[in-house]
Image (cartoon, rainbow, N blue to C red):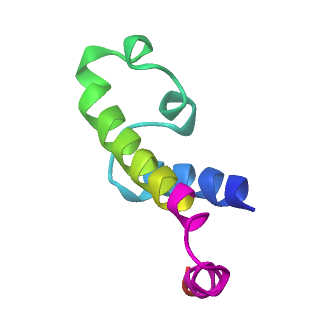
Amino acid sequence: MYNVIRFVGCKVAVCSKGTQTSIDEALLSELDIKPEQRDDWQEVQNYIEALNYSLDRLDKLPAITCYLLLFVL
């Protein structure tokens, strides 16, 4: 289930952050991004990194807390 949330989070990061980064570009490495687009790409990467960190932390919380958090999302 977390993989679905990760994918949706990636799509949300691209669509809602007001960046000019496509979902394909979000999956590329920094070296593959044009220098003038790297700020937008980095903003999307920061969002994805924060989401992934949060999802990884869910495994360390009691099950009821995870359920409540996922219910809210």
> What span is colored magenta in the figure?
56-71
Image point (34%, 44%), residue name: 46
Q: Residue furthest toward the top?
A: 31
Image point (50%, 28%), residue name: 25
Q: Quadrant of the N terminus?
A: bottom right
Number of numbered discs visible in the structure rendering: 0
Image point (30%, 26%), residue name: 37
| Residue 5 falls left or right of residue 45 | right
- Whether 19 is drawn above or below 29: the answer is below
Q: Residue furthest toward the right?
A: 1
Residue 69: % across, % down: 55, 81
Of residues 22 and 31, the one nearer the viewer is 31
Magenta stretch, overall SS: helix
Image point (30%, 42%), residue name: 43
Residue 44: % across, % down: 38, 43
Query: Residue 4's image quarter?
Result: bottom right
Of residues 40 and 3, the one nearer the viewer is 3
Q: Quadrant of the C terminus?
A: bottom right
| 33 is within the stretch colored magenta | no
